[in-house]
Image: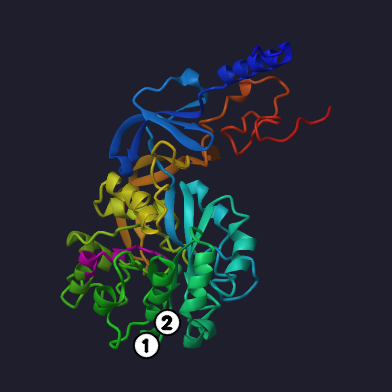
Amino acid sequence: MRPTPIAAFFLLCMAHYASSQPRYDLLLQGGHVIDPRNGISAVRDVAIKDGAIAAVGERLNASDALKAVDVSGLYVTPGLVDIHVHVFAGTGERNSYAGDNSLYPDGYTFRVGVTTVADAGCAGWRNFEAFKEHVIDRAKTRVLAFLNIVGNGMRGGRFEQDLADMEAAPAAEMARKYKGLIVGIKTAHYGGPEWTPVEHAVEAGTAAGIPVMVDFGTDHPERPLADLVTKKLRPGDIYTHCYSGLRHELDASGHVNPGMIEGRKRGVIFDVGHGGGSFAWRIAVPAMQQKFLPDSISTDLHVGSMNSGMKDMLNVMDKFLAMGMSLDDVIVRSTWNPAREIHHEELGNLSVGSPADVAVLRLETGKFGFTDMYGARLSGTQKLDCELTVHNGRVVYDLNGITRPEWTTLPADYRETGNAAWDAVTPARGGRGGRAPAKK
Ligand SMILES: [Zn+2]
């Protein structure tokens, strides 16, 4: 059947529309791509379309892109994944990680290349939905969460030492209700000699099919670290603060606790969780020399850490460069490894079809210093800066305006210069997904 003239005209318009649409929204050209998931560490172009990675190749055509950006001389990595932060801010509760000790995430993420964080147990099953409503759903950063085994979450000693509030069943039920968003169960800060917090966390994690992350609290001879990682935790469970030295991570002779080596063989994961009081050079350097490397690099971001030895995600990564780890080895521990640990294998990589979360980093050389929890310094010659962060295909941070036009090239009365197809910072009015044109 022949189409009516009106239908034919419509089809012609559609065909013209399709052919005039650029193949890519954003093209990052000429950077050194480090994508451990796909075994790439080489100069490549990265193309993005509709919020997803569209192509990674040696020479992609700039004319196929709505916006092409020269990132030569820079490193292009998956958006960084920080699996230990504290972001349940805004409740007004003093001395509480479900309150004043936490930070709103967006101020500490995109500017250092982080696109995904996992809150490490600020909320338990009793207050998780408030956390979700007030922080997770409102953040631009992708915020996931470890659910505290304590029903009240990390609200301070009175709550965190209450064994009666560490119930596996309601924690598992909440985790199942928000599968994918709740990525694990956390136990933390426990001061007593009992195994109950760990056992109940593992019980909840098993019921919900998710890993457990352990901050092992006060050191007790009744519950030694070796037993935790060789007997109590399951393969895939995460021991955080692994270079704190607070729980015999090194033995008296300065050797890595044999239990940690045994635990690693069983598949237990070791995470940095630097924080304000969980990273010491006198532990980390010998452990690294003995080839006990972390599986994942994370910050333990909170109000007490972000201006101390720990500055931000890049600072913690810099510390591993300063201890002699290669940049490729640092990147895998800040992207693909943590994404796998929290069972989000669509993240932390630049595979075609993955969410287009990308960090563009500059490796500076010079004289730099890095401090630990005790204020001791280790000197280094390399430091990462974040030039550009892309989240779900759109630029969310651009330090030096490398995606932007020179103002002198613009009309005298220029306004917003971007396009909402690739720009979340200052998209042009009327662009795709942008605001409506202003009325004159
Ligand atoms: Zn923490």
Q: Nearer the viewer, mark 2 or mark 1?
A: 1
Image position of 335 (left or right of 401): left
Q: Residue at x 30, y 37 (%)?
A: 40
Please report contact status of discs 2 and 1: CB closer than 8 Å, yes or no: yes
Q: Is residue 236 visible?
A: yes
**Considering depth in this image, is 412 or 130 the residue closer to the camera?**
130
Q: Which residues are magenta?
A: 263-275
Q: Decide: is 140 above or below 305.
A: above
Q: Which residue lies under the disc numbered 2?
A: 190
Kind of residue at badge 2: Tyr
Q: Which residue lies under the disc numbered 1?
A: 194
Instruction: Tell me the quarter of the picture where residue 263 sits.
Output: bottom left
- Structural distance between the alpha carbons of marks 2 and 1: 9 Å
Instruction: Tell me the quarter of the picture where residue 192 sits.
Output: bottom left
Image position of 177 (left or right of 189): right
Q: Decide: is 351 above or below 380.
A: above
Which quarter of the image is occupied by the N terminus?
A: top right
Confirm whether the magenta stretch covers residue 222. Answer: no
